[in-house]
Image: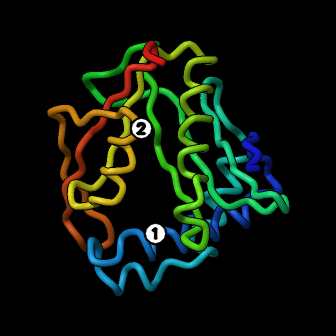
Amino acid sequence: MAIIRDAVPADAARLAEIHAVSWRTAYRGLLSDGFLDSLQPTTRLDWWNSRLARIPPRWAVLVAEDEGGVIVGFVTIGHCDDDDRRLPEAGELYAMYVDPDHWGNGFGRILLAGAEARFRADAYSDATLWVLRDNQRARRFYELGDWHVDDAEQRLVIGSDAVTAVRYLRDLTEG
C-alpha cells in the first residue's frame, strides 16, 4: 500500500531524479530528443532544494512512497495564477510525475486523490492543470479522474520546441 506524505528537504535528490527520468520518458516524441537527453537529476536538484526549503502557505509537495518506503512519484499544488482564475478558491496542480518504472501501478491515481484532498483541506473549490495538447496518455489519465478540458490554451517554448498546452478544470465540490 502506498503512503502519501508531505515532501521534506531530504527528498530533493529523489524528486530531481524522478523529475528528469519522467520527462525523458513521458515527453519522448513531444519534445526534441536532444533536449530530453540533456535532462539529468543534477539539472533539477537546485530547484528542488530551493522549493522544499520554503513551501508557501496553501501550497504542497506531496510524495508517494511504495511499500518499501521508496519515493516513486510526486505532485506539486498551490493557488492558480492564470489571469482569468486568480481567485482565493482556485487552485492549480503544477506538476505530477511518477517514476516510469512504476507506471500502471496506481501511484498516479493515489497522488491525484491526495492532491485533491489537500486542495479541499486548503479551501480550494476547484483546480486547474496544464497538459501538453499532444500528450494523449496524460490527457486520458486526467479525464478518467473527472478533470475536464476547458477552452484555454497557451503556447510554450520548452527547450527549443514550441508546443501548445491545454487547461483542465476539476470541480472539487463534487465527490
Residue type at mark 2 is: Gly
**Between 61 and 86, which is closer to the camera in this rendering?**
61
Q: Which mark is residue 67?
A: none
Residue at horizontal 62 percent and vertical 35 percent from the top:
114
Q: Secondary structure at mark 1?
A: helix
Where 123 sits versus 132, above or below? above
Q: How is the image coloured?
A: rainbow
Could you say which quadrant of the image residue 158 lies in?
A: bottom left
Single out the mark in the foreground, 2 or 1.
2
Asked whether residue 53 appears in the rendered view, the answer is no
Please give the residue where the numbered disc 2 appears in the rendered image: 145
Indicate the quadrant where residue 161 lies: bottom left
Is residue 55 something one can see in this rendering? yes
4 to the left or right of 25: right
- In the image, is residue 101 above or below residue 88? below
Given the image, on which type of amino acid does mark 1 rest? Trp
Task: Tell me if 19 is positioned left or right of 55 in this view.
Answer: left
Residue 129 spot, x, y in % from top left: 37, 39
- Near mark 2 (Cα within 10 A), the count class, few <14, some 14-19 or many ≥20, is few
Assess disc 1: are there few (<14), some (14-19) or many (≥20) residues with their C-alpha within 10 Å of its C-alpha: some
Upstream in the sequence, badge 2 or badge 1?
Answer: 1
Distance between mark 2 and mark 1 Cα atoms: 21 Å
Mark 1 = which residue? 23
Q: Position of residue 44 (x, y in %)?
A: 59, 66
